[in-house]
Image (tube, rainbow, N blue to C red):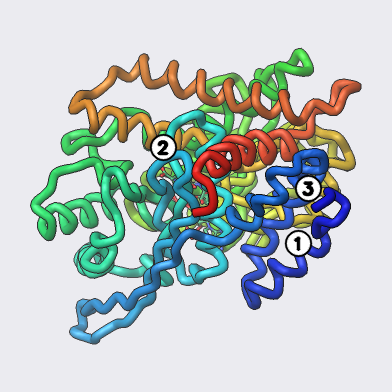
């Protein structure tokens, strides 16, 4: 078949939309990748004829299951659980587990699709997967969370394994939930194995896994700024979210001499013109993570700050921005506001926080803009290092891991430049990340034939 006979981008996306009705997040994630990959594939007949992108955009497997649990009042509660195993061409499925009421098949399919490219970019042998439940951890007691995690793992355990599929944390799932799930896995299988990452340090976890996503997103930001001869010293940063990724991104910005102006949660954002120092970040970590509090309480603790209910922080003028909460939290209008206010660089800590209009606005303005699949890969990268340590049955030192994380982020930055350098000093990091991630997975798939 001649290249010109192949379905074009629009035809391809029509098919994706038809096959995935009511799955807007998944369609959006595929569209963002396909825009770059169709251009890249133009003169690459084999990728077309072997239907590589079509195959990557069709998960290997979507497992969906019922999760029953009993709340503290004795009521029987029924949730839905999933594991999306998107692609294992270059290694076992790997990706987090999300507990949030907004979780559905579309969200998990988009996350597993993105994860496939992200994991390839790390250079480590990991395929892409994602899982989760529409369980809402907010307002639940620790015992309720434990019972839910145990029930969730009672089904999930048969689909995962150290060389099969290795879940980790994501929104609503931190070390505590990983502990409950690992405990149940071990109880059912009698196997102490590296089947989950993000484990506690006493039972197979890796140093710096907790910090890795946020720190990595800032390392990537620093790499981007360095291409313009700049660094973070004295720069103002606007950050959304106040969970694992946001607080550690804030911490690293402060360590590198920047000033963090905002944090947020689903209730709104706080603006602290004095800067959110390490002491204040520690307060947020303790308040949000350990006490499941609200970010609006920040203003009672630090009265010079203001709280903006129901709003996102993108209207606050800044040099750099890091969306670190959730998908589609930064829209086209927000992107234009950031650009108009002089924002020079955006590094995504969250997965797909910017909608397609926003992505196009950042690209058109040619600012330094890193998509999450490149800039937030530090978390899964250290998860990959946790898997290696588990296999070797040893623990590496903190300095070794810090260096490996920096090297991996720097390697991803290099890959983005390799495929995204548009000349004239502009690097399209979206294109670079999409092509570099795709090429690795695609070439492995070609080697396997039609499977
Ligand atoms: P956490 O659960 O620790 O924190 C999530 C934060 O985002 C909270 O502040 C939460 O507010 C806010 N948030 C969640 N959902 C919404 C929503 N629908 N609207 C507004 N705010 C929301 O999660 P993480 O920090 O781990 O994850 C944040 C992002 O980073 C996600 O996109 C995740 O996929 C991504 N990511 C995480 C990695 C990791 O290692 N943990 C690795 C790579 C990416 P509230 O408390 O009000 O719910
Ligand atoms: O989105 C992500 O990369 C994660 N939530 C981390 C996945 C992992 O396996 O560590």
**Residue where numbered disc 3 is placed:** 38
Residue 294 image offset from top left, x and y in percent: 47, 58
Q: Left or right: 210 with respect to 298?
A: left
Local crowd size for mark 2, using a 10 Å CA cut-off: few (<14), some (14–19), many (≥20):
some
Q: Observer-nearest residue: 272 or 206?
A: 206
Depth check, front residue: 435 or 247: 435
**SS at badge 2:** helix
Q: Is residue 331 visible?
A: yes
| Mark in front: 2 vs 3 | 3
Q: Is residue 439 left or right of residue 61?
A: right
Give the image location of residue 211, x and y in percent: 42, 33
Q: Which residue is mark 2?
A: 282
Q: Is residue 184 above or below residue 65?
A: above
The residue singled out by tag 1 in the image is 12
Residue 76, by quadrant, is: bottom left
Helix, strand or loop status at disc 1: helix
* Percent coordinates x, y for residue 430 in the rendering: 72, 39
Q: Real-space Cα distance between discs 1 and 3?
A: 9 Å
Residue in view at x 19 percent, y 42 percent: 193
């Amino acid at each position: 078949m001649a290249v010109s006979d192949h379905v074009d981008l629009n035809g391809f996306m029509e098919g994706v939309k038809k096959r995935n009705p009511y799955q807007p997040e998944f369609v959006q994630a595929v569209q963002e990748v396909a825009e770059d990959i169709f251009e890249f594939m133009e003169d690459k007949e084999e990728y077309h004829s072997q239907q590589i992108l079509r195959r990557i955009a069709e998960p290997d497997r979507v497992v969906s299951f019922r999760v029953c649990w009993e709340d503290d009042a004795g009521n029987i509660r029924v949730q839905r659980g999933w594991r999306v195993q998107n692609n294992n061409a270059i290694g076992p499925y790997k990706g987090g587990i999300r507990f949030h009421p907004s979780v559905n098949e579309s969200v998990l399919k988009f996350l597993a699709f993105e994860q496939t490219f992200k994991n390839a970019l790390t250079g480590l042998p990991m395929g892409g997967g994602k899982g989760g439940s529409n369980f809402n951890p907010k307002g639940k007691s620790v015992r309720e969370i434990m019972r839910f995690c145990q029930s969730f793992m009672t089904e999930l355990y048969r689909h995962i394994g150290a060389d099969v599929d290795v879940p980790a944390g994501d929104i609503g799932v931190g070390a505590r939930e990983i502990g409950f799930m690992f405990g149940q896995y071990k109880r059912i299988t009698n196997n102490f194995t590296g089947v989950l990452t993000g484990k506690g340090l006493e039972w197979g976890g890796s140093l710096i896994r907790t910090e890795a996503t946020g720190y990595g997103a800032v390392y990537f930001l620093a790499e981007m700024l360095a291409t313009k001869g700049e660094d973070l010293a004295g720069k103002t940063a606007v950050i959304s979210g106040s969970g694992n990724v946001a607080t550690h991104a804030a911490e690293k910005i402060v360590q590198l001499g920047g000033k963090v102006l905002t944090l947020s949660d689903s209730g709104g954002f706080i603006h602290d013109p004095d800067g959110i120092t390490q002491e204040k970040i520690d307060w947020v970590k303790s308040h949000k993570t350990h006490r499941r509090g609200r970010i609006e309480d920040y203003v009672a603790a630090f009265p010079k700050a203001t709280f903006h209910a129901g709003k996102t922080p993108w209207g606050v003028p800044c040099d750099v921005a890091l969306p670190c909460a959730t998908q589609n939290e930064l829209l086209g209008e927000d992107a234009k506001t950031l650009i108009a206010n002089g924002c020079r660089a955006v590094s995504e800590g969250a997965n797909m926080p910017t909608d397609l209009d926003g992505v196009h606005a950042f690209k058109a303005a040619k600012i330094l803009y890193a998509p999450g699949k490149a800039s937030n890969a530090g978390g899964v990268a250290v998860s990959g290092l946790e898997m290696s340590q588990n296999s070797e049955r040893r623990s590496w030192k903190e300095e070794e891991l810090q260096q490996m994380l920096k090297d991996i982020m720097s390697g991803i930055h290099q890959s983005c430049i390799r495929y995204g350098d548009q000349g004239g000093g502009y690097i399209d990091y979206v294109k670079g990340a999409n092509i570099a991630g795709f090429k690795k997975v695609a070439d492995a798939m070609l080697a396997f034939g039609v499977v």
